[in-house]
Amino acid sequence: MFDKALGVHPFSLQLRTDRAEIIAGNLANVDTPGFKARDINYKQIMQDLAYNIQQGQSQPFAAAETGHQLLYRTPYQVSADGNTSELNIEQANFAANSMDFQTSLTFLNMKISGLRAAIKGD
């Protein structure tokens, strides 16, 4: 019941959390020779999720259940040591993901507040 009431927001938060871990790994290895930066395509995963829900399929509990794989990032400037993690790009992606996480959290909070009001009869 709560899955339908809360919509995709809990899944979105988990996906944003998973993406933050991936980007943090990229940041941690920015100076590691040969490291290949990874990321997920959040927009594509959410589009596929919306399509699957429209088709009557159940919502996954975790990003790994969507069948989407981690993607390798193509660097803007190729480094001599083969590392594709770029500090400024990873920092920008981490900051954007953090803001998007806060937005998703706000939507989830509004949903919960609405449910609380409905239960109380307000």
Image (spheres, rainbow, N blue to C red):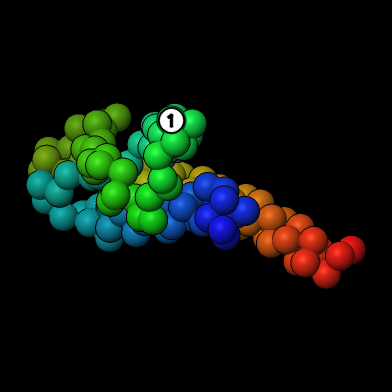
Spot occupied by residue 49 in the image (x, y as percentages of width and height): 42, 37
Nearer-the-camera pick, 47 or 118: 118
Locate the C terminus by quadrant.
bottom right
Q: Which residue is mark 1?
A: 55
Q: Is residue 117 left or right of residue 4?
A: right
Q: Is residue 72 left or right of residue 91?
A: left
Q: Residue at x 16, y 55 (%)?
A: 32
Please tell me how many numbered marks the rendered image carries: 1
Instruction: Name the residue type under label 1.
Output: Gln
Nearer-the-camera pick, 27 or 113: 113
Locate the N terminus by quadrant.
bottom right
Which residue sits furthest right? Answer: 122
Nearer-the-camera pick, 32 or 8: 8
Spot occupied by residue 57 in the image (x, y as percentages of width and height): 40, 39
**Residue 59 seen anywhere in this rendered image of the structure:** yes
Q: Residue at x 18, y 38 (%)?
A: 79
Q: Is residue 116 left or right of residue 69?
A: right
Spot occupied by residue 70 in the image (x, y as percentages of width and height): 24, 43
Q: Is residue 116 above or below residue 58?
A: below
Nearer-the-camera pick, 1 or 114: 1
Q: Secondary structure at mark 1?
A: loop
Q: Residue at x 69, y 55 (%)?
A: 111
Which residue sits furthest bottom? Answer: 120
